[in-house]
Amino acid sequence: MEKEVTTMLFLDKGNGNRVIAFCSYCCSQIKINEDVYPAVRISSFALDKAYHKVGMEEDGCRCSTFVLKYCIHRFNKMKRETIFAKYVILHAAEKSKVVQFYTENNFKVFTANHKTIMPKGETGNDYWLFRVLE
């Protein structure tokens, strides 16, 4: 079953509206013990390599962190207004820097008590991570 995905684009208006990042997401769920909760699933998150080490003056963090924080802010707003999800979940390839980036931004790696519906092909040594929405 295919899920409908929504994508947020992040543009550099000072550079001809160049796409610097995007975040695609859809509705999903997370199972904790025997309880199932609605979740927002980040299906794709990417930042242009040219912006990987760029800092943001607004809050002194890297561009990637700023974009992720903005996405979480939007998910929190949607939680209160429309989707009522309790969690954000995502699938990360086995790369220590990727997992480290998400854990530095308050995501936790799934344990035996956490489960999600895993799409085909997303198994093995990769990681599922989650974060509680506010």
Image (spheres, rainbow, N blue to C red):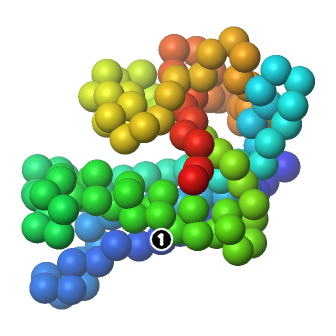
View extreme (front): residue: 134
Residue 132 falls left or right of residue 119: left
For the point 60% across and 22% down, the residue is 110
| Residue that mark 1 sits on | 8
Dot 1: few (<14), some (14–19), or many (≥20) neighbours within 10 Å?
Answer: few
For the point 57% across and 53% down, the residue is 134
Residue 50 visible in rendering: no
Residue 62 falls left or right of residue 70: left
Q: Whole-percent x and y of residue 99?
A: 38, 28
Mark 1 lies on a secondary structure that is strand
Residue 80 falls left or right of residue 75: right
Q: Whole-percent x and y of residue 5?
A: 65, 63
Q: Quadrant of residue 63?
A: bottom left
Residue 79 visible in rendering: yes
Q: Quadrant of residue 89?
A: top right
Residue 132 higher or lower than 93, as above or below: below
Residue 72 falls left or right of residue 15: right
Q: Whole-percent x and y of residue 79?
A: 67, 63
Q: Whole-percent x and y of residue 103?
A: 39, 31
User: In the rendered picture of this protein, how many numbered marks are placed on residues?
Assistant: 1
For the point 51% across and 14% down, the residue is 125
Which amino acid, by three-letter code, is at mark 1? Met
For the point 89% across and 24% down, the residue is 34
